[in-house]
Amino acid sequence: MHAILVLTLLAQPAEKGPRKPELDPFIAKAIEPAAGDSELRKLQKDRVRERAEYLARAKEILAAGRWESSYLQEVIKTEVTLGENLAELMVKPADKVKCYEMRVDALKKFEQFVDRRVQVGTDPPQTRNLAKAARIDAEIDLLKLKESLKGMKP
């Protein structure tokens, strides 16, 4: 019996590293390889993939209740950078706007999460300020982008 189990396990393809987290469909579509992608474009897509996977894993940690305050600045920084990196991949102005809107939405949710942690005493009050400032920065960047795109074809 043990021999059958061992042979069955050995016959299974070995997983290479941790499982890939599920990405937002908009992001997944943006990073799909395309014929004719330059080396720069491939690297830009890889960069977006890595940041998106990091954030997906961070959200899993958050949902599991294993969140630590030390993650705060890295998550905020990554949300900001992901939005910018993703927008670089976009051709249509409406898609660029969507990238910045996704960033605002993510930082709003993160701000609410931090606010709850501050209210229950898990995090110090200044973390609320940091989360709120990051969300405000994202809203400012979104408004600036929309203003810069006025008059352009959608």
Image: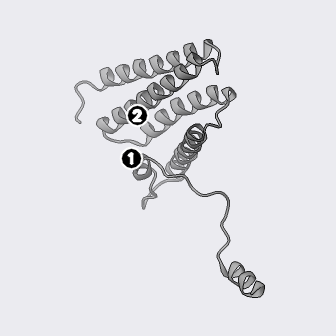
Left or right: where 10 falls relative to 95 = right
The reply to whether the C-beta atoms of the residues labelled 1 and 2 are less than 8 Å apart is yes
The part of the image, by quadrant, that contains residue 145 is top left
Left or right: where 6 falls relative to 99 = right
Q: Nearer the viewer, residue 149 or 51?
A: 51
Q: Nearer the viewer, residue 114 or 100?
A: 114
What residue is shown at x 47% (from left), y 27% (from top)? 107
Crowd class of label 2 (few under 14; some 14 to 19; many from 20; radius 10 Å): some
Q: Nearer the viewer, residue 39 or 133?
A: 133
Classify 51 as above or below 140.
Answer: below
Q: Nearer the viewer, residue 123 or 48?
A: 123
Q: Assign a secondary structure to mark 1.
A: helix
Residue 52: % across, % down? 53, 43
Of mark 1 and mark 2, the one earlier in the sequence is 1
Q: Calculate the distance from the C-alpha at mark 1 to the C-alpha at mark 2.
A: 10 Å
What residue is shown at x 65% (from left), y 77% (from top)? 12
- Quadrant that contains the C terminus: top left
What residue is shown at x 24% (from left), y 30% (from top)? 152
Q: Assign a secondary structure to mark 2.
A: helix
Residue 68: % across, % down? 67, 30
Classify 20 as above or below 55.
Answer: below
What residue is shown at x 33% (from left), y 39% (from top)? 95
Checking the image for residue 26, the label placed there is 1
Residue 143: % across, % down? 35, 20
- Quadrant that contains the N terminus: bottom right
Residue 139: % across, % down? 40, 20
Q: Which residue is mark 2?
A: 102
Kindly identify the amino acid type of the residue bearing the numbered disc 1.
Answer: Phe
Classify 52 as above or below 126.
Answer: below
Kindly identify the amino acid type of the residue bearing the numbered disc 2.
Answer: Met
